[in-house]
Structure formats: structure tokens, C-alpha cells
Amino acid sequence: MRIIVCSGTSPGFDLRHFVDVNFTLPKAGEKYVPPAGQSLREHIDGLWPVLTRSTKNVEKWDSLLPLPESYVVPGGRFREIYYWDSYFTMLGLAESGHWDKVADMVANFGYEIDAWGHIPNGNRTYYLSRSQPPFFAFMVELLAQHEGDNALKEYLPQLQKEYAYWMEGVETLQPGQQNQRVVKLEDGSVLNRYWDDRDTPRPESWVEDIATAKKQPQPPGNGDLSRPPFCCRLRLGFQLPLDG
């Protein structure tokens, strides 16, 4: 960041040239053109290999988090795996008979729980501060339909770790208090909520978040809309399955 700031003040600074010299950019994916006359099922079956990625190793300083097995991405500008979306991808894989890919994706999410203590929003470094709806149990249950109870036994430790992540701090809460992802109501009931450990504009949508913040009414005093609570709320909103 210091290099960027210093270079950016130099006469004739060109951001495009700076990026080309100092960064290893991802290769553009080949454009997929489906054959004419396909049925819907044939079209979907043809997309699985196109959308499958393998990133056991990544470039130094890459924001992409490596995963031990292959996985299916949404496509387009989304070149990484996303947590809750993947469950519905896995339903499609199962329908297409690709149980090997279902098993690989469950293994990847289990790996993330072991590595980070939870499943990030997506496998990018800037997603590590938040998760998404906890679908891992549904994923394991889906795999168990094919592999039997052994799948449930294999991933029980990761299921317990993810539960602990969502319930962290609940033991010390008094009625009316909250801590990260748990809230205790006045009647003693416990609810979970979305939470992000960071409160700055999202790196993946920095410009958009700043622009959105500027459209909001100015808070009392010298409040800065690029800081919490506004950006924190934006981050929470994008954990919901409604962000598309």
C-alpha cells in the first residue's frame, strides 16, 4: 500500500502500467459457447466441467484461498466458491450423478472449518471475517444420501466446530445482551445473527460501498459514513441469501 501511495503521487503515474508490472493477474477464462440444439439437461451437464476449478496452489499475495479438492464456481465474474450458493450447486451435481464432485466440495468446506474455524463467505482472504447461512449440515446430509452414515461420522468434528463458531460467547450472555453471532432475548431465548469482524467498506466492492455511503443522510456530529455502523450493516447484509 505504501508503494502505491508513493507511486501515485509521481508525475505521469499510470495505474494500469503499475498493476501490470507489480501484480500477477488471473488469466481470462475461455468463453464457453454451448452446442446448438441441446436440451436443458444437456446444457447443464455441459457446464459442469466449464465451471470446475482446482486451486491447490495459488500465487503469492493472491487473495484466493487454496482448497485441497476441485470445486464448482458460479461463473462470470465470480471465480471463487461461495458458501451457501454451493449447496444448491451440489443439489444439481447430485441430480447429474456427479457424486464425486459433491464429495470434493464437502471435503473443501470441512477443510475450511479446520483451517479457519468456520466457512468463509467465499474462498478469498477478504471473506475471512464473515460467513454465510450455515448450510454445511445440509451438505453433509446430502452426501450421506449417497455414502450412508459414514459421511455423518466423518464430518461430525467439523459440524461441531461450525456450531461452536455460531454459538461462541453464548454461555456468558445475560438476557438482553449479544456477542458476535448470538443474541439472548429478555425471556432467555437465544437467536443467531449475522456478524462481520470488520467494519470497513468491503475490499471486493470498496468503490460501491463508499458511493452507497455517500447517498445516506449525514449522521449527527462528525460521523463518517465510511466507518461503522453503516459499513458494518452493509457487510452483514451481504451475508444474506438475498444479495443477488
Image (cartoon, rainbow, N blue to C red):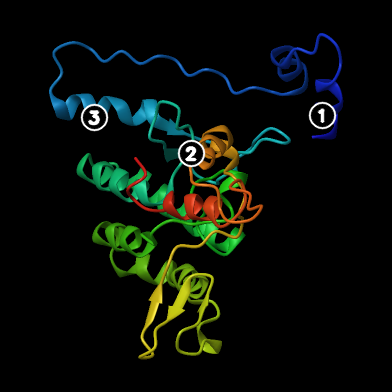
The residue beneath circle 3 is 44
Relative to 219, is 182 above or below?
below
Q: Secondary structure at mark 1?
A: helix
What is the CA distance from the residue labelled 1 to the residue labelled 3?
A: 46 Å
Viewer-proximal residue among 48 and 126: 126
Write down the quadrant of residue 82 in the picture.
Answer: top left
The disc labelled 1 sits on which kind of residue?
A: Val
Say whether disc 1 or disc 3 marks the residue closer to the N-terminus.
Answer: 1
Q: Position of residue 103 (x, y in %)?
A: 38, 51
Relative to 57, is 120 above or below?
below
Q: Position of residue 199 (x, y in %)?
A: 60, 54
- Name the residue located 54 percent from the left edge and 59 percent from the top edge: 196
**Extreme residue toward the front, this view:** 221
The residue beneath circle 2 is 215
What is the CA distance from the residue labelled 3 to the residue labelled 2?
A: 41 Å
Say whether disc 3 or disc 2 marks the residue closer to the N-terminus.
Answer: 3
Q: Quadrant of the N terminus?
A: top right
The residue beneath circle 1 is 5
- Circle 3 residues within 10 Å: few <14, some 14–19, many ≥20: some
Relative to 71, is 45 above or below?
above
The disc labelled 2 sits on which kind of residue?
A: Lys
- Circle 2 residues within 10 Å: few <14, some 14–19, many ≥20: few
Left or right placement of residue 228 versus residue 24 in this view? left
Q: Secondary structure at mark 2?
A: loop
Left or right placement of residue 99 versus residue 53 in this view? left
